[in-house]
Amino acid sequence: MKLIIQIPCYNEEEALPVTLKELPRKFRGIDRVEILIVDDGSEDRTLSAASRAKADHVVRLINHKGLADAFSTGLDACLRLGADIIVNTDADNQYSGKDIQKLIDPILAGEADIVIGDRRVETIAHFSFIKKRLQKLGSWTVRRLSGTEIPDATSGFRAFSREAAMRINIISRFTYTLETVIQAGKKNLALAHVPVATNPQLRPSRLFTGIGAYIKRSISTILRIYTLYEPFKTFLTIGGVIFSLGLLLGIRFLFFYFTRGGAGHIQSLILAAVLMIVGFQVAMIGLLSDLLAANRRLIEDVLYRVKRMEYSGKGGR
């Protein structure tokens, strides 16, 4: 059984050696442990730091592509290297390496495909009150949309079985954390969560420039991914709301028409007709999107079969 710990990095020359030093090299139920560094176009000496710390593998992206691309590149590299289990952690030593055993135990026991570390954000000292509330709200929203019970959807400390890693396809360019949870829920992958410890902050987060930017990009990511997997429900709801507004205006016009002759309310009739037509068209877009989603599922199934053939015989057992 082979475990690969992947670490996406961007300008982590100072933090990376600390992170690598804290990672254990032996785990119960694992025969072989390797570490993969994904250098996301760093402009400092991250590569030299990885080499000095004796990382087993390094994948370098020529230019900075973002966390989601780095994570996806790492998954693909781990599969090519024959990983049976892949653990993703951050380069800033946010997570305790000793908790990796807790992450992989449910996978080893055959109880989960993906296990996510629950940081219990309310206990993290360097998180502001607003950030804690936003993290809680975001995780609650993802749980509702994905049909899962993950309490910390934004945690990057997570483990994937080989099967789950082959089924995950990252589309977002911002972050993989929310997307993988929603995807896993919609693909009926078995998710689990375990409490994990966090280390003192080495540096401020660089994923977003402020709370406003974080909220904007997170909402955009959640809506995009949910719409991708539930297009008919999404567009039918939007179309239904618009159509209902038009219908109410139409009823209002009819009321005035039969009680007062309708004079002066022709604008309501025009607006009602426009809203009902737009609502119907949005619902039809949902129907078309649902057909496209069915085609996407077939493509994903083909991609999964291609991955199985490509990575067959590369398991670490």
Image: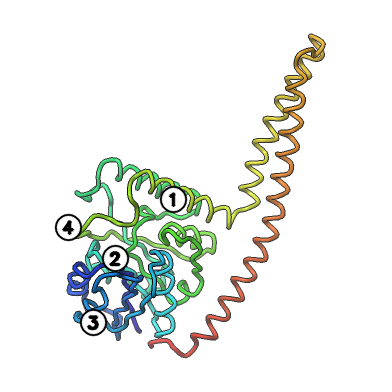
Which residue does the numbered mark 4 point to in the structure image?
A: 200
Which residue does the numbered mark 1 point to in the structure image?
A: 217
The residue depicted at 38 percent of the width and 67 percent of the height is 64
The image shows residue 151 at horizontal and vertical percentages of 36, 52
The residue depicted at 44 percent of the width and 77 percent of the height is 76
| CB contact under 8 Å: marks 3 and 2 | no
Mark 4–mark 3 Cα distance, whole angstroms, equals 25 Å
Q: Earlier in the sequence, mark 1 or mark 4?
A: 4
Q: Is residue 16 left or right of residue 305?
A: left
Circle number at residue 90: 2
Q: Earlier in the sequence, mark 3 or mark 1?
A: 3
Report the front residue among 266 and 104: 266
Which residue does the numbered mark 3 point to in the structure image?
A: 51
| CB contact under 8 Å: marks 1 and 4 | no
Q: Is residue 254 left or right of residue 144?
A: right
Mark 3–mark 2 Cα distance, whole angstroms, equals 17 Å
Q: Earlier in the sequence, mark 4 or mark 3?
A: 3
Q: Residues within 10 Å of mark 4 (few under 14, many from 20)?
A: few
